[in-house]
Amino acid sequence: MFNKISYLLFIILPSSCWCNDNNLVIPYNNYKIKLFILIIFIFCYVLVILEEFLKIKKSKVTILTSTLMWLLIFSTSFDKTHLNELVKTFILEYCELFLFLFVTMVYINTIKHFGVLNYIQSYIVYLNLSYRQIFWFTGVVSFFMSPIADNLTTALLMGSVILSVDKYNYSFVNLSFINIIVAANAGGAFSPFGDITTLMIWQKGILHFYDFFYIFLPSFVNFMIPSIIISKYLPLGSPQKSMLKVSRKLDTATKLLLLLFVFTIFLTIVLQTALNIPTVIGMMTGLSLLQVFEYFNNKYNEYKLNTNNQIHNIEWETLLFFYGIMLCVGCLSTVGILNDISAFIYLKLGGYIVNPVYTALPGNFIIGILSAIIDNIPVTFAVINMNHEMSVGQWLLVTLAVGTGGSLFSIGSAAGIALMGQASKAYTFFSHLKFTWAIFLGYILGLLTHIILNNKLFFLFC
């Protein structure tokens, strides 16, 4: 909804790209300590990957690791004043992201509290569609809902719809879950609100809000290609007719709440794009409006709201994990490790391409594949801090690759991991792996679509 309005409003505003910030790197020549720091980080990430088996929260691991890494640098560096400023810079980046996500999560929880998601779910089930119709309906809804509600929330909602329809038809559930994951991740790639990675890139000032819409069609290609292929394997017929009725109509207060959420997003975009005001200001203003809404709702409406309860129920584990991982990656950036990796990925591998405009293509392609193996959030933050100068087209390629590359494996995105938990018998790592080839085909064609359609953006630098 707000995407179309915002696009029309800001289409006349100029594009932007991010210039390198070499102040985030210090002269650090203690190679033994650098190697030790890298080993600590790798060990930390292994523990993060094995979280489900070890039963250790990843936030605990990353926060402790970030502290150890920075202690090593401070204890072996002479320029502690500069280091202190660098740490504050990374903490400020985290605080901006934290407050943005904090407000978004409170709104989403409040919307859930008012039964909006249950209303959507029960209405879809009540339509009594065929397996094929449900497959395409949930896929298309996921693609267009993800830019607003984020890919994780979208995947969980649509996954619940599929399970409500026929949770015992494992083939249908598996194929529909794969379709939802691909659609949600692809849809989230062309909006700053669709995924944490796009939000990080937008908040950093690398791209303007409307720049993301250049990859709408490539994202759609990324979604459609594997979905068309996977749909060929769907079971025939329809699920048993559902007797579930629509839970309740949306009342005036609920509609007002939805409008308030859309207005908050729109206000944030206007303030950031027109006046260059940090996005946090717009979102926190939206939080204050929500509290005003709470006051009048509790005064005149029987269905009460307590925003403190919604704050209590937000995903604190996720927010704390972001703190740890951003400080860890910031440490790697400070001692120059990310610069070394950047030199290999973008210069060594891209050195075989004659045209300098396209030297980052192999690196960005690999970054997308890495996001399927490693969580896309630290991958994106690492790319941001690699200090590699790229055009608007290349940054959009990074956004598209990282956003959609996670669909290749079930563990490659938060949406995939969440749905594995919803239906552990029907949807598994290996059941997803059977269709990785189709998803990879969509990944390649999506990137090629962007390179061909948006070729002029690859020549647009700071």
Image: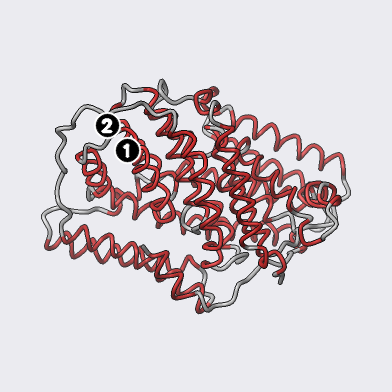
Whole-percent x, y for residue 306 in the image: 24, 53
Distance from the alpha carbon under mark 1 to that under mark 2: 9 Å
Q: Nearer the viewer, residue 327 or 263?
A: 263
- The reply to whether discs 1 and 2 touch (Cβ–Cβ < 8 Å) is yes
Q: Give the image location of residue 305, x and y in percent.
A: 22, 54
Residue drawn at (65%, 40%) of the image:
369
Rendered position, 406 above or below 432 = below
User: Left of 289 or right of it: where is 394?
Assistant: right
Q: Earlier in the sequence, mark 1 or mark 2?
A: 1
Instruction: Assign a secondary structure to mark 2.
Output: helix
**Residue 130 visible:** yes
Q: Which residue in the protein does label 2 denote?
A: 165
- SS of the residue at dot 1? helix
Q: Percent x, y for residue 197?
A: 56, 52
> What residue lies at 56% left-to-right and 35% top-to-bottom?
438
Whether residue 161 sits left or right of residue 74 in the image: it is left
Name the residue rendered at 42%, 23% in the picture. Answer: 424
- Viewer-closest of 365 and 172: 172
Quadrant hosting residue 6: bottom left
> Above or below — where is 188 with respect to 179?
below
Q: How is the image coloured?
A: secondary structure
Q: Which mark is residue 194?
A: none
Q: Which mark is residue 134?
A: 1
Disc 1 or disc 2, which is closer to the eye?
A: 1
Q: Amino acid at mark 1?
A: Ile
Q: Is residue 76 visible?
A: no
